[in-house]
Amino acid sequence: MRPPRAVLVLAAAAALLLLLLAPAARADGGGGGCGADGAGAPGDRARARALKIAAFFSILVCGALGCCLPVLGRRVPALRADGDVFFLVKAFAAGVILATGFIHILPDAFEKLTSECLPAGGPWKDFPFAGFGAMVGAIGTLVVDTVATGYFTRLHFKDSATAAAAAVGDEEKQQQQQQATAAAPHAGGSDDREGHVHMHTHATHGHAHGSTALVAAVGGGEGDKEHALRHRVIAQVLELGIVVHSVIIGISLGASEEPSTIKPLVVALSFHQMFEGMGLGGCIVQAKFKLRSIVTMVLFFCLTTPVGILVGIGISSVYNENSPTALIVEGILNSVAAGILVYMALVDLLAEDFMNPKVQSRGKLQLGINVSMLVGAGLMSMLAKWA
């Protein structure tokens, strides 16, 4: 899988999300608690603007720090991808992502899709759309996960077979040239000499054929190639789920005009972004992307929420988070994102590491990653009090 192409798909998805939220940015002008919230006092707006700027830089730095720690940790022997510390860090990050889906995103989706501000005559109160969206997100992730992994695995082996055939052809030509060169000075020699040359060349050719085909097909380790392909799919699907959620929370924070609401969100969302970045960074390390692809994915993750904040600031004067369109769009997207993150955390992150032979054969490491996962999930759940 070519990472830049996948990241472009993620960018297109984020742009589509912003276009969907654009109609919801205008207040409906309804009465009661479902209308426009009001602009607030000038002093509050000034303080809110300062807090939003602080949030922009704080979330940007914390996201970059969390995502880059596993990437830069490759140069530290203790943090290599097959080390015990890396297993602990990844379990912690997976617990964070699991709590993000269950505790942060899914309840918010239920709240929005069952709001009193939705049209009374609509289907929103007669069917659990939030749970349905989470199920669709999880099943869709399963389909994308398996189909993409299978497709790129087949593509990889097809390319390997082509490279092996080309390498074998080159070896055959080289052997034929060597045989002709060796036979020329001894054209009048005995039959035994000719047979010896022929047998030696044939044996050498067979050895070169087998070794070249093996190197070309495997590329330094068949298991390593399959492992890297698998984690490339995981990293990009995980980033998709995180990006959808990050744009929404960024817009919500940027559109808020209440300093009392924004202040706790600055700290909570900074930690939130850092923990999520650690999980994504761990997957990027295991995927063995090239440097350019790593930089692209890290930048895309780090900038998503800050860009959402800027969009929220731009539409804050007309945005009403309680308008029916905003509630429906955000609720559906949040529910799908929750399904994606829950699936990724349980299936692609926790299950894979917990069933790893290295973990299964060592009781202390197994206990350690269980504790690390619970700590990550617990800390992220605590942040739900503020964000």
Image (spheres, rainbow, N blue to C red):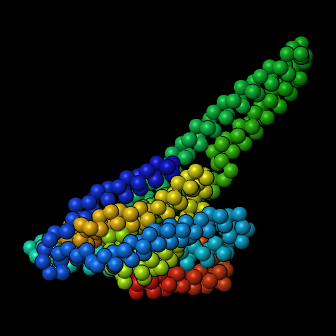
Q: Residue furthest top?
A: 188
Q: Which residue appears at 75% of the width and 33% of the height?
A: 205
Q: Is residue 328 above or below residue 265?
A: above
State whether residue 142 is above or below residue 377: above
The answer, for residue 387, to whether it is visible in the render is: yes
Where does the image place residue 164, in percent across and percent down from the top left?
63, 38
In the picture, which quadrant includes the C terminus?
Answer: bottom left
Q: Give the quarter of the image for residue 321.
A: bottom left
Of residues 378 and 213, the one nearer the viewer is 378
Query: Which of the pair 128/254 is nearer the observer?
Result: 254
Q: How many marks?
A: 0
**Can the viewer see residue 131?**
no
Outermost residue, front direction? 42
Q: Residue at x 12, y 77 (%)?
A: 31
Q: Residue 27, image x and y in percent?
A: 19, 68
Residue that protrudes farthest toward the left in the picture: 121
Closer to us: 140 or 261: 261
Image quadrant assignment for residue 143: bottom left
Lateral position of residue 167 relative to residue 131, left or right: right
Residue positioned 62% across, 35% down in the render: 165
Q: Is residue 356 left or right of residue 252?
A: right
What percent of the width, then of the height, locates residue 64?
A: 55, 66
Query: What is the x, y in percent for residue 299?
Result: 51, 58
Does residue 381 lie above or below 169 as drawn? below
30 vs 254, left or right, is left
Q: Is residue 70 above or below residue 165?
A: below
Q: Residue at x 28, y 78 (%)?
A: 41
